[in-house]
Image: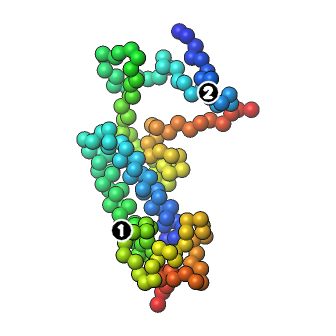
């Protein structure tokens, strides 16, 4: 899968939204097999998407979920309001470098 | 049948948010309904919106999709 950063983030947001919707449905219907199957399928898809994203573009969250390359990627990858999601020259963006 | 009054706190240009209970279909309500109790009908599990559509619409479930309508001019 070769998506640009913005599209990839959007894809993850879509999956997260779908999964939390199913979470809420299952809270009141814990024995609903179809809903649980959909939840598990989309959760797996979300987990894979996050791993792929973090490999390519750096961490999605600041601690506890993904190891960081040197230097500390969280501080150096674009912030959400930098919505072109481009890596500036003084940023490390090690995940985007093709060496 | 009494008309449902417009809720005093709702904006005038919004459609009346209080649905007429006589017009609402009743799903799976037990026969022993009591007065002065709130009941939430069970949500059937139908099809799901495509995920990009769900995020735009604010729900994954077509049967929960109830957008506010624009005021007709």
Work out whether B21 lies above or below A96.
above
Q: Which residue is drawn at 35% across and 63% down?
A: A47
Q: Is residue B29 left or right of residue A2?
A: left
Q: Please tell me in which quadrant of the rendered image residue A27 appears.
A: top left
Residue A67 in view: yes
Q: Residue at x 55, y 10 (%)?
A: B2
In this rendered view, identify the residue nearer to me: B9 or B27.
B9
Q: What element carries label 1?
A: loop
Is there a contact, CB below 8 Å, between mark 2 and mark 1? Answer: no
Q: Which residue is drawn at 50% across and 51% down?
A: B55
Residue A2 image offset from top left, x and y in percent: 47, 73
Q: Which chain carries label 2?
A: B
Q: Please tell me in which quadrant of the rendered image residue A88 appears.
A: bottom right
Q: Please tell me in which quadrant of the rendered image residue A68 appears.
A: bottom left
In this rendered view, identify the residue nearer to me: A13 or A60.
A60
Residue bearing mark 2: B9
Residue A57 in view: no
Q: Which residue is drawn at 40% across and 47% down?
A: A21
Q: Is residue A68 left or right of residue B6?
A: left
Q: Is mark 2 on a helix, strand or loop?
A: loop
Residue A85 image offset from top left, x and y in percent: 57, 71
Q: How far apart are marks 2 and 1 (CA)?
A: 45 Å
Residue bearing mark 1: A64
Q: How crowded is mark 2: few (under 14 residues within 10 Å), some or many (20 or more)?
A: few
Colour scheme employed for the rendering of this structure: rainbow
Q: Mark 1 lies on which chain?
A: A
Residue B72 image offset from top left, x and y in percent: 70, 32
In this rendered view, identify the residue nearer to me: B62 or B39.
B39
Q: Residue furthest right?
A: B73
Q: Is residue B7 left or right of residue A73?
A: right
């Amino acid at each position: 899968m070769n998506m640009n950063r913005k599209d990839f983030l959007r894809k993850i947001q879509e999956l997260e939204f779908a999964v939390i919707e199913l979470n809420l449905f299952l809270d009141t219907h814990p024995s609903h097999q179809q809903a649980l199957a959909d939840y598990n399928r989309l959760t797996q898809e979300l987990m894979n998407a996050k791993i792929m994203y973090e490999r390519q573009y750096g961490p999605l969250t600041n601690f506890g979920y993904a190891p960081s390359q040197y230097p500390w990627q969280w501080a150096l990858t674009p912030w959400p309001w930098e919505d072109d999601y481009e890596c500036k020259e003084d940023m490390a963006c090690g995940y985007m470098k093709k060496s | 049948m009494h008309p449902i009054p417009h809720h005093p706190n709702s904006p005038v240009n919004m459609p009346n948010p209080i649905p007429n209970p006589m017009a609402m279909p009743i799903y799976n309500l037990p026969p022993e309904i009591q007065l002065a109790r709130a009941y939430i009908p069970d949500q059937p599990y139908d099809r799901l919106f495509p995920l990009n559509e769900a995020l735009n619409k604010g729900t994954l479930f077509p049967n929960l999709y109830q957008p506010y309508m624009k005021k007709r001019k």
